[in-house]
């Protein structure tokens, strides 16, 4: 079936257009021109590529660590689709090997069933730095073993990201993970710059929530932050909720690495897409106050951020061009995952993952592979 969408504003992943058409056939963009016999739907707003979130711990009241099954993944994906997220790598926070195996099995099942919006898995830990653990449970932080390697290197998990601390995982193990197709990110780390650079040389290509839970940049000790900002090739996730990173620091990072290397991420917890304000987390609880999530004592506990809000904040609060914000939410994470040949743009041949934003940059409609997954009407 051919459907032509007539949009007042249209961002194709690279360029903004006015009064443009996008024709979808089956699950892909067929043409950027009207087609004979196509059903025509007029859209009032900005049509853009769907957002891709590479760090999302939960949503809709479900946390992947506790709802570690395909139903939990379905709940999380559905919750985030109302905010324009059309693809994600659900993220498992540091846990025991049993939970890691359960998460891998759930992901394999979700991919086998082609669960909309789920393209792989992100293991955030457990091979982290205790001084930079954040809310990760210290009792689960440990050295990498064959058991974890076997799960990380499975070939039925789609895109796999592993966040680790390079001072605790040697370069040869990083290189082996990369050889097996794993995307290695550096995070929750107190490493120095030299250790960080060795990890990059071994094949690490990303930094998890830049600035947060990593050794800072100072004049004579660049730390992980300095190494990340100075490296031209690596990618970095950035949480633009205005709590995790000061706007000036966020702008500095984007200026240093560019829109092609900074990815907007949410680090969202189960609260997103849910009315609940307090949810259990291992032996503590995460409380929402406004748009801020903390555990007792005040430590930030992930975020209540969604991708549409990340785009809005980047445009309205950081003052960045809207094109750049949309690219950092879609094409850049697609490129990081090696999917920019079929995702992150709305051009012929690309998957029809689309989001419609109103004049306030709120989500009106969302489509995954040409199928409506959210409508505000």
Image (cartoon, rainbow, N blue to C red):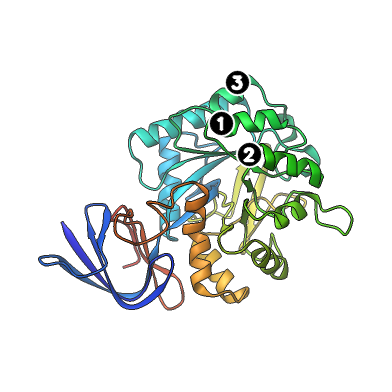
The secondary element bearing badge 3 is classed as helix
231 lies left or right of 330: right
Residue at 63 percent of width and 27 percent of height: 96
Mark pair 1, 3: CA separation: 17 Å
Q: Earlier in the sequence, mark 2 or mark 3?
A: 3
Q: Are marks 2 and 1 in contact (CB under 8 Å)?
A: yes
Q: Residues within 10 Å of mark 1 (few under 14, many from 20)?
A: few
Q: CA distance from mark 2 to mark 1?
A: 9 Å
- The reply, left or right, for residue 10 in relation to residue 244 is left
Mark 2 and mark 3: Cα distance apart in space = 21 Å
Residue 147, labelled with which disc? 3
Q: Nearer the viewer, residue 171 or 43?
A: 171
Question: Which one is in front in this view, the residue at disc 1 or the one at disc 3?
Answer: 1
Q: Residues within 10 Å of mark 3 (few under 14, many from 20)?
A: few
Residue assigned mark 2: 203
Q: Which residue is mark 1?
A: 179
**Other residues around mark 2 within 10 Å, as few (<14) / some (14–19) / many (≥20):** many
């Amino acid at each position: 079936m051919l459907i032509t969408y007539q949009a007042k504003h249209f961002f194709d992943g690279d360029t903004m257009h006015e009064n443009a058409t996008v024709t979808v056939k089956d699950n892909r963009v067929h043409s950027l021109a009207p087609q004979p016999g196509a059903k025509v739907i007029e859209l009032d707003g900005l049509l853009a590529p769907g957002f891709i979130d590479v760090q999302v711990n939960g949503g809709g009241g479900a946390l992947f660590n506790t709802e570690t099954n395909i139903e939990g993944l379905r709940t999380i994906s559905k919750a985030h689709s109302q905010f324009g997220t059309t693809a994600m790598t659900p993220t498992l926070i540091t846990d025991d090997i049993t939970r890691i195996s359960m998460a891998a099995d759930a992901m394999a099942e979700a991919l086998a069933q082609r669960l909309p919006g789920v393209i792989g898995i992100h293991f955030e830990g457990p091979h982290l730095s205790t001084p930079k653990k954040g809310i990760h449970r210290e009792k689960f932080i440990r050295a990498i073993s064959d058991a974890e390697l076997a799960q990380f290197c499975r070939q039925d998990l789609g895109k796999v990201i592993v966040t680790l601390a390079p001072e605790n995982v040697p370069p040869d193990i990083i290189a082996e993970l990369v050889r097996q197709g794993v995307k290695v990110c550096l995070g929750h780390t107190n490493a120095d710059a030299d250790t960080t650079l060795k990890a990059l040389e071994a094949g690490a290509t990303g930094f998890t929530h830049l600035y947060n839970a990593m050794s800072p940049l100072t004049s004579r000790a660049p730390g992980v932050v300095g190494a990340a900002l100075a490296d031209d090739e690596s990618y970095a996730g950035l949480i633009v909720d205005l709590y995790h990173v000061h706007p000036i620091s966020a702008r500095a990072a984007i200026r240093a690495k560019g829109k092609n290397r900074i990815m907007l991420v949410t680090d969202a917890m189960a609260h997103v897409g849910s009315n609940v304000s307090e949810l259990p987390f291992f032996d503590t609880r995460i409380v929402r106050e406004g748009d801020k999530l903390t555990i007792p004592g005040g430590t930030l506990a992930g975020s209540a951020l969604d991708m549409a809000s990340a785009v809005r904040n980047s445009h309205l609060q950081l003052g960045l061009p809207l094109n750049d914000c949309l690219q950092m939410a879609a094409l850049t994470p697609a490129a990081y995952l090696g999917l920019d040949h079929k995702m992150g743009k709305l051009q012929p041949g690309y998957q029809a993952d689309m989001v419609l934003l109103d004049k306030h940059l709120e989500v009106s409609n969302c489509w995954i592979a040409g199928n409506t997954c959210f409508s505000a009407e």
